[in-house]
Image (cartoon, rainbow, N blue to C red):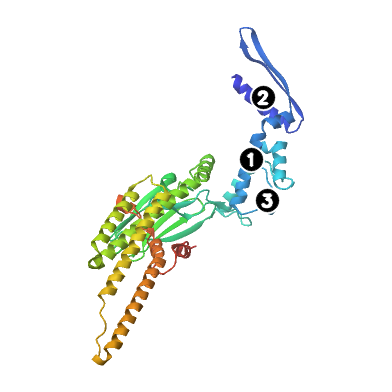
Amino acid sequence: MAVQRLREAAEKAKIELSNRNTTSINLPFIVSDDSGPKHLELELGRGEFEGLVKHLVDSTIEPVAQALKDASLQPDQINRIILVGGSTRIPAVQQAISDYFGGRTPDRSVNPDEAVALGAAIQAGVLAGEVKDLLLLDITPLSLGLETLGGVSTKIIERNTTIPTSRSQMFSTAVDGQSSVEIHVLQGERAMAKDNKSLGKFLLSGIPAAKRGIPQIEVAFDLDANGILKVSAQDKGTGQEQSIEISNTGGLTEAEIERMRQEAEVYADEDEKRRLVADLKNQSETLFYNCKETLKGNANQISDELKERVRQEAAALKKAVANAEISYEEMKQQVESFQEMLYALGSAIYEQAGQNSSPSPSPSSSFASEDSKLDATQEDAEETENAEDIEGMEDTDDTSSGLSLVNNSIIDTPFGIDPVSVPEPQPIRAILLRLNSLN
């Protein structure tokens, strides 16, 4: 009871100090002990009060700055400053806002206690079609995306996108003969799927057996004005389609949204390292695939010593892929070591091919000496060509690996989707930009 009386007196003093320089707090019989009842009587000035709440006033500037940053605006680009909530009547709050916006005076034409209710009423009129001359733009507070291979969260609709909106992106399978993919819808700003909020899952099956990267699966996100999200996945080859409708995309409180946003900022560096490790593990699976195909077609041209090196490097890289705690630097070192082995493998194949090549038959023995010169010239040309081919492999290997994006989750789980591989000699980032969204 005493605490309730103190709270009521504090609220009364706060309101009075918005219009006065001092206020009196008088609470008789607030408590009682063996010596008798106790009374609270004191004078509180506005300066002392503002000193007590200064940290709270300063904290109100942070969300204002974040809102401007999200909107890509500067303080001088704002036309009007509307105060919302009764505590904005505190002179210290108004002064802090005025200072942040370069001395501009906030607009007091709207009652701070009624601002939210008025905005809700206007939005209801817009949605009902009764308000024609006004447009209120709502946004999605957190990014929406899905889980891709390696547990990475791939964003489809970015945070602060105005709604209604639609986005789509092309994906593909990650293993040969994969007949189904699981679509795991996520909400949040973290780089890894497990750190975001799961909104739902569904399975797209009936995908014809094909080499990995061949099937094209279009995943579309459609977010309407009511915050209802429809996610669909369609196999472009067969027309097979599955979808899910999620109505709780706005089910988070403001405090939860702010917590998730702050966590994304705090763990940004750590999440980026984890994402990079996942990318390297994806690249490892592509390297395994390329190595397997190379050995399958050229096993007779590779020495036993090189085969043993391949086995050792493959075992070391697989161990690194299976290590959930491996650092980015260690994973990068293993991937680069395996790549160097692949380069050596390619060199050995080309060298063996050069040794096995035979010269063209001579039309006459009188041209024997000339043929010998020609053979030597051909061998020099072949060596030069082989060197150029190997250099070409080094130039394009990173691109092909980037296009594959196959991940270690093909070992852990039977399902998964991966951004589609397009057989063009350009980096994957350029391809994702081209396929990123369809409005």
Q: Which mark is residue 133?
A: none
Check disc 3 and give the amino acid type. Pro
**Residue 70 in view in this figure:** yes
**In the displayed image of the protein, which residue is found farthest to the right?**
21
Q: Residues within 10 Å of mark 1 (few under 14, many from 20)?
A: few
Residue 189, horizontal then vertical, whole percent: 49, 48
- Give the residue displayed 30% in from the left and 82% down from the top: 375
Q: Which residue is nearer to you in this view: 139 or 136?
A: 139
Give the left or right position of residue 173, taking residue 260 as reference.
left
Q: Which residue is nearer to you in this view: 226 or 340?
A: 340
- Give the residue displayed 32% in from the left and 84% down from the top: 373
Marks 2 and 3 sit apart, C-alpha to C-alpha, by 37 Å
In the rendered structure, which disc, 1 or 3, sits on the residue that comes first in sequence?
Answer: 1
Q: Does 59 appear above or below 408?
A: above
Element class at badge 1: loop
Q: Residues within 10 Å of mark 3 (few under 14, many from 20)?
A: few
Element class at badge 3: helix
Residue pointed to by mark 2: 9
In the rendered structure, which disc, 2 or 1, sits on the residue that comes first in sequence?
Answer: 2
Q: Which residue is nearer to you in this view: 262 or 217?
A: 262
Q: Which mark is residue 75?
A: 3
Residue pointed to by mark 1: 60
Which dot, 2 or 3, sits closer to the camera? Answer: 3
Give the left or right position of residue 365, taking residue 22 as reference.
left
Marks 2 and 1 sit apart, C-alpha to C-alpha, by 24 Å
Q: Residues within 10 Å of mark 2 (few under 14, many from 20)?
A: some
Which dot, 2 or 1, sits closer to the camera? Answer: 1
